[in-house]
Amino acid sequence: MRLQNKVIVVTGSCTGIGKAIAVRCVAEGARVVIHGLEQDLGEAVVAELGQENVVLHVEDITIDGATQRLVEIALTTFGKLDAVVNNAAMVVPSNLHTTDLAVFRKILEVNALAPFALIQAALPHLRQTRGCVLNIGSVNAWCGEPDLLAYSASKGALMTLTRNLGDTLHREDGVRVNQINPGWVLTEKEVQRKREQGFAADWYQEVLPDFAPAGRLLWPAEIAAAAVYWLADESGPISGQVVDLEQYPLIGRNPPKDAPTFPTSPPVRL
């Protein structure tokens, strides 16, 4: 098993990509702190993975002391901390005309400041285990969909945080920091969002090839499979790296002729 005896905190792991990462981590031998906002969904994850393997903490990640409590739960339950996965995120459609400062600040708090705070709280313990941090970003960090302005900016901030800390923490503390930028992933919440926008129940079965050349969206389990490499010792000394996981190149893509426009700008993840 690639994560045997490791203890990992995964934020936003009651659903979607975070849940898939938690499931895969346990399958690879790790013990995991499950975190999210949905008590019932979190309890379902615990029932699925077993109380001997996971512990649940339900709390808004932006509340004062929340990140420190996640670290303490890992230590009191499992005795140490080997890795942190910053996955929790807030996805809110917005552009220059619809974004007010209150919403922008909240998105930044969830998507960029909370990961910083969790890294800060976890660092003394990650230093002891020569552990690592994996941030889950978004391909929107490079520019972003027109109606995902604040979300995209927050993921750009997270990406710079990853590169900055991936250098300094690796040199000074022996802690690696890397990031995955998922593309368009078929999660429960993404299905729900599209239904709320008026799409058919099976909309994801007919995604145009310009958006999904493979004929389907990415699956959370595919992101989780990639996450294991960065959490495992096999990724060696690699730090400060950002990897895009999408079906086509984001930068320098050759746009198809007469490319159709998606009815609504597709949120990328969660």
Image: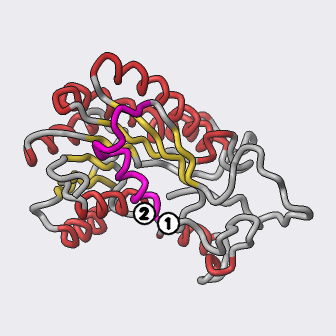
Taking depth in this image into account, of 217 and 117 the one nearest to the observer is 217
Image quadrant containing the N terminus: bottom left
Tell me what residue is drawn at x 36 percent, y 41 percent.
235
- Where is residue 130? Give x, y as percent: 23, 31
Disc 1 secondary structure class: helix
Question: Which kind of residue does numbered mark 1 sit on?
Answer: Lys
Which residue, given by chain and number where applicable, does mark 2 sit on? Answer: 16
Q: Is residue 51 above or below residue 135?
A: below
Question: Which kind of residue does numbered mark 2 sit on?
Answer: Gly
Tell me what residue is drawn at x 23 percent, y 34 percent.
68
Q: CA distance from mark 1 to mark 2?
A: 7 Å
Disc 2 secondary structure class: helix
Q: Give yes or no for contact between labels 1 and 2 (Cβ–Cβ under 8 Å).
A: yes
Asked whether, in this view, residue 130 is left or right of residue 162, the answer is: left
Taking depth in this image into account, of 257 and 206 the one nearest to the observer is 257
Taking depth in this image into account, of 116 and 226 the one nearest to the observer is 226
Tell me what residue is drawn at x 19 percent, y 71 percent.
47
Q: Is residue 221 magenta?
A: yes
Asked whether, in this view, residue 30 is left or right of residue 111, the answer is: left
